[in-house]
Image (tube, rainbow, N blue to C red):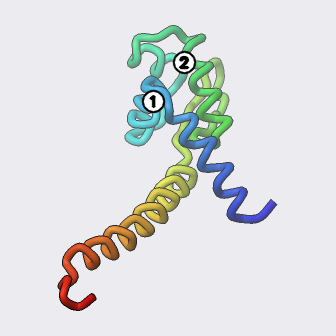
Amino acid sequence: MSEQMVAQTSAARIFGALGDQVRLEMVRRLASESGTISAVSQNLGISRQAARKHIQVLSDANLVSLAPRGRETIITLEKQTVADAQRFIREIEAKWDLRLAALKAHVEADPTDS
């Protein structure tokens, strides 16, 4: 598989995982500090079982890492994966900027030049 295909597959997993409001909120909170499954479930008002399912989706997309500590599991946001998602968005944005600049130039062109 080419590097571009790998990047697209990774982006699809990332954005698929972020396609849920609960998981988006988890990521937003984990961006500030790591947490435990208990803390995440309490903060979001969901059961530990529901939190575990959402966290597993985030983990499968490499958005978080899980580290067992005693009876708890510490959840940490994977900054590199977030950076990869940001890079993907910037690439798309750059392409659109070029297209919009070309459209602007076309619209603003003097019709007598044609």
Q: Position of residue 81 (x, y in %)?
A: 57, 51
Q: Is residue 68 left or right of residue 95?
A: right
Locate residue 4 relative to residue 22 in the image: left or right.
Answer: right
Q: Whole-Å distance between the Cαs marked 2 and 1? A: 9 Å
Between 1 and 29, the one nearer to me in the picture: 1
Instruction: State which quarter of the image contains the N terminus.
Output: bottom right
From the viewer's perspective, tell me whether residue 50 is left or right of residue 56: left
What residue type is disc 1 on?
Met
Q: Residue at x 43, y 26 (%)?
A: 21
Residue at (39, 18) in percent of width and height: 43
Residue at x-position 19% and y-position 77%: 108
- Determine the image quadrant of residue 75: top right
User: Which residue is under mark 2?
Assistant: 51
Q: Residue furthest bottom?
A: 113
Give amino acid for label 2. Ala
Kindly check if marks 2 and 1 are in contact, taking CB atoms under 8 A apart as contact. yes
Q: Secondary structure at mark 1?
A: helix
Give the mark, 2 or 1, whose residue is nearer the N terminus.
1
Q: Nearer the viewer, residue 2 or 74?
A: 2
Q: Locate the C terminus and report the quarter of the image it occupies.
A: bottom left
Residue 26 badge: 1
